[in-house]
């Protein structure tokens, strides 16, 4: 049986090839692109629009590919962080975004123990989704945990507020400014992750998009944003009149994290898309990521809410399988040469 030392060494070499030796990373990526393309063909589906493994620059460097653990929450709760981190490191993931700090039936675990497991497997904590209530009542404790885990970002996947009026979003922006100031004082970046609802229009002013209220009234120096690309495109479908990429281009500094989640067009769905495994959907990731300035400086975090139930065609339902194939697809993304 392969020892953890061997696994850690292999993971280190993989990351070194992706982040230190840029030329080597490009060549390694080309090989992975070929293997990923071959696996998709073998499974009975080829590259979809916007996903092909082009010949240009690497769009998501290996050292910046992460996973939101919500995608494999069934594995975390049944196997625990130790087994999950070992498997993710073996797949090639470099970064972890948390969706809580518990491991279900496996038993209690402390932040210090989680950090040890991260370090043992050559993984970095890049962020965490916590509830707004957690920050409102226990901000310093949340920041303590973030520091123990070594993460640079901490945030929430909740909408800023359920009050979909202009005044409601203005009040939420003020609250988030407070969260941002507290995090900044500890050297952390506080962020908000969108779903589609933030892009709706205010109930008291149909001319005003709520995301714009939040964007324009939070301090760009201390309140950051994690665009979930899938939900942004769903928002565009349901509440037309904007291009998701334009928000990032307006102030690239505000978007250090991206959720790379794929969707397949479904005209029968109110959302316009069905959530699917990365690489088999229709979202134009090659074009989207190629359009962003500062390529390689963002953290690309794979997420698929239904990964335990919806695999790529021809594969059994298994969130680990989705995670591994999605890593290969993200790693294979190539854009236009600058």
Image (spheres, rainbow, N blue to C red):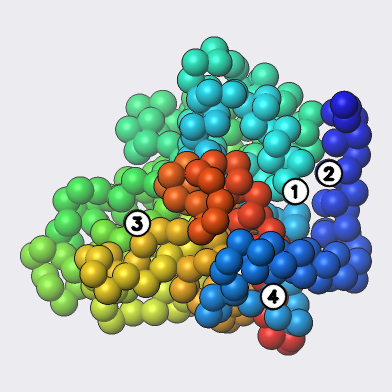
- Say left or right for 57 vs 323: right
The label on residue 11 is 2
Q: Out of 314 and 157, give the one closest to the viewer.
A: 314
In this rendering, which labeled residue sits more in front, label 4 or label 3? 4
How far apart in space, not on screen, are marks 2 and 3 (Cα)? 33 Å
Kindly indicate the quadrant of the structure image that contains residue 138.
top left
- Say left or right for 275 vs 73: left
Dot 2 and dot 1 residues touching (CB under 8 Å): yes
Q: Quadrant of the C terminus?
A: bottom right
SS under mark 3: loop
How far apart in space, not on screen, are marks 2 and 1 (Cα)? 7 Å
Kindly indicate the quadrant of the structure image that contains residue 199.
bottom left
Which residue is drawn at the image coordinates 11% and 70% (left, top)? 205
Residue picked out by circle 4: 53
Give the mark nearer the N terminus: 2 vs 3: 2
Vertical arrangement, residue 291 with respect to residue 147, above or below? below
In this rendering, which labeled residue sits more in front, label 4 or label 2? 4
Give the mark nearer the N terminus: 4 vs 2: 2
Residue 307, percent across and down?
48, 47
Which residue is drawn at the image coordinates 42% and 53% (left, top)? 193
Vertical arrangement, residue 95 with respect to residue 296, above or below? above
Residue picked out by circle 1: 92
């Amino acid at each position: 049986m392969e020892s953890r030392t061997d696994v850690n060494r292999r993971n280190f070499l993989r990351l070194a090839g992706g982040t230190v030796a840029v030329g080597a990373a490009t060549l390694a990526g080309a090989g992975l692109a070929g293997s990923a393309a071959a696996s998709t063909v073998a499974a009975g589906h080829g590259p979809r629009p916007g996903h092909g493994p082009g010949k240009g620059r690497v769009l998501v460097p290996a050292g910046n590919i992460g996973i939101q653990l919500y995608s494999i929450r069934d594995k975390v709760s049944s196997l625990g962080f130790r087994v999950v981190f070992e498997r993710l490191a073996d797949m090639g993931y470099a970064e972890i975004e948390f969706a809580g700090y518990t491991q279900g039936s496996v038993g209690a675990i402390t932040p210090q123990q989680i950090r040890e497991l991260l370090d043992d497997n050559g993984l970095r904590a890049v962020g965490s989704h916590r509830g707004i209530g957690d920050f409102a009542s226990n901000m310093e404790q949340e920041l303590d945990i973030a520091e123990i885990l070594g993460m640079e970002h901490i945030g929430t996947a909740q909408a800023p507020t359920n009050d979909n009026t202009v005044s409601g979003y203005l009040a939420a922006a003020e609250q988030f400014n407070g969260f941002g100031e507290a995090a900044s004082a500890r050297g952390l970046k506080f962020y908000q992750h969108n779903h589609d609802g933030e892009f709706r229009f205010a109930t008291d002013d149909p001319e005003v998009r709520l995301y714009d209220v939040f964007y324009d009234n939070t301090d760009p120096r201390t309140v950051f944003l994690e665009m979930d690309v899938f939900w942004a495109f769903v928002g565009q479908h349901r509440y037309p009149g904007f291009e998701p990429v334009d928000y990032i281009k307006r102030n690239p500094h505000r978007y250090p994290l991206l959720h790379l989640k794929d969707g397949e067009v479904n005209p029968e769905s109110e959302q316009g898309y069905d959530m699917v495994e990365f690489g088999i959907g229709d979202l134009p990731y090659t074009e989207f990521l190629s359009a962003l300035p500062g390529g390689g400086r963002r953290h690309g975090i794979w997420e698929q809410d239904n990964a335990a139930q919806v695999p790529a065609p021809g594969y059994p339902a298994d969130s680990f399988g989705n995670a591994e194939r999605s890593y290969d697809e993200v790693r294979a993304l190539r854009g236009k040469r600058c």
